[in-house]
Image (tube, grey):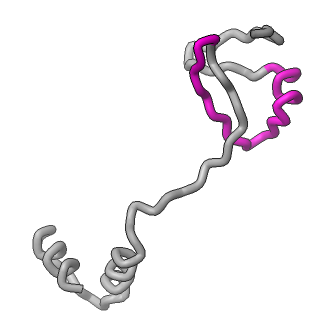
Amino acid sequence: MTILETAKMTTKGQITIPNRVRKLLRLKQGISVAFGLSKDGVVLMPCEVTAKSPYTPKEWEKIEKLASGKGRTYHSTHAAKVHLDTL
């Protein structure tokens, strides 16, 4: 492995990626970076992060129906869950 630059870690665990390395990897402000481990050390690479919904489309339909309901209140979380299951 060829060492291009070095950097010091702050007390908060932050490291500034040296300008030379940022240019080689074409890293711009706001880009996400992935870290991996290899037998030779740490691998750093640009990546894309996408959001993944915790709900299925069917569950979203149920949630939207509940949200559109007017004035519906529940006295317990159990009652709300029972109602959700019936939708």
Q: Quadrant of residue 14?
A: top right
Is residue 76 placed above or below 22 in the rendered structure?
below
What residue appears at the point 59 percent right and 18 percent down from the top-left corner? Answer: 38
39 in the magenta segment: yes
Is residue 84 positioned above or below 5 on the image? below
Left/right of residue 72 with respect to residue 21 in the rendered view: left
44 within the magenta span: no
Residue 68 x/y as whole percent: 37, 87
State the image coordinates of residue 50 (x, y, percent, origin top left): 59, 54
Is 4 located above or below residue 49 in the figure? above
For this rendering, which residue is in front, 43 or 85? 43
Q: Who's the residue at 13% across and 77% down the image? A: 82
Horizontally, residue 80 falls left or right of residue 65, namely: left
Quarter in which the C terminus is drawn: bottom left
Residue found 16% across the figure and 78% down from its top: 74
Q: In the depicted view, which residue is nearer to us: 26 or 69? A: 26
Q: Which quadrant, please, contains the N terminus?
A: top right
Q: Relative to residue 61, is residue 31 depicted above or below?
A: above
Q: Is residue 40 left or right of residue 75?
A: right
Q: Residue at x 39, y 76 (%)?
A: 60
Percent x, y of residue 55: 38, 66
The percent coordinates of residue 12 (x first, y second) are 56, 19
Q: Residue furthest front?
A: 39
| Range drawn in magenta | 18-40
Q: Where on the picture, by quarter, is residue 77?
A: bottom left
